[in-house]
Image (cartoon, rainbow, N blue to C red):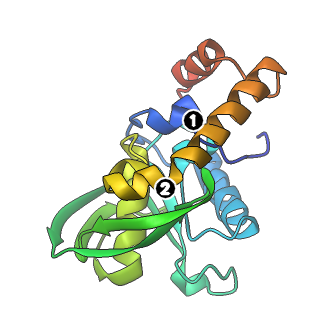
Amino acid sequence: MEKLTIKKYPHPILKYKSKPVTKIDATLKETVHQMFGLMYETDGVGLAANQVGIPYQFFVMNVSGNRENKEDEYAFINPVIHKKKGKEEDEEGCLSFPEIRSPVVRAAEIELEGISLEGKPQRFTWKGLLARAVQHETDHLKGISFVERLSEPAFVEIRERLAELETQFETDQRLGLVPSHEEIKDQIAQWSQW
């Protein structure tokens, strides 16, 4: 398995609606393990599969951000949010949008259902940062990024940084450091792992 890297905006896979996982195998478990490592290396608290170029519905999360706190680690396969209650605004950032942080309104409480790495159903009701992180990561799996949830004034504040990321991505493509849009589309279509 090749080393995982975080795909940065405006990489097309970040807009891709991920496919459901149909089998849990050793490769998926190893991928989840690598995703946790990458998340910790980059000071994240959550990481969705499409953020590392994998078009499937799973994500990892540890809101403590501390790899020593194994009890705070969660991996969700085919996650679904069933209920949302209340609203609250708080600042969010994203590993795919470096150096961008902005306030986002999210549900204050959510009920999440998914499959564990052991293939068992799991259901949680969470508030606070856990609820926020779950909503952020499940959005990724639907091809929605947190910047699409910003108010108009908040979006205006980050527009310049988004333009810089777009320019960098285009430059990287011209230099051959990042595949072309067509090559990325072909890579996504060829995934049939899970």
Choose top left, top right, bottom left or bottom right for residue 165. top right
Q: Which mark is residue 166?
A: none
Q: Are marks 2 and 1 in contact (CB under 8 Å)?
A: no
Front position in the image: 133 or 57: 133
Front position in the image: 107 or 80: 107
> Where's residue 69, x and y in %?
62, 87
Residue in the image at 38% along x and 44% along y: 144
> Where's residue 32, x and y in %?
61, 57
Q: Which of the image's four quarters has the N terminus?
A: top right
Q: Is residue 125 above or below residue 14?
A: below
From the viewer's perspective, is 109 left or right of 188? left
Q: Which mark is residue 10?
A: 1
Q: Is residue 108 above or below residue 159?
A: below
Callout 2 amino acid: Glu
> Where's residue 4, x and y in %?
73, 46
Residue in the image at 67% along x and 54% along y: 30
Q: Label 2: which residue?
A: 157
Task: Measure the C-alpha gap from mark 2 to mark 1.
Answer: 18 Å
Choose top left, top right, bottom left or bottom right for residue 62. bottom right
Mark 1 closeness class: few <14, some 14–19, many ≥20 residues within 10 Å: some
Secondary structure of the residue carrying tag 1 is loop
Residue in the image at 51% along x and 46% along y: 159
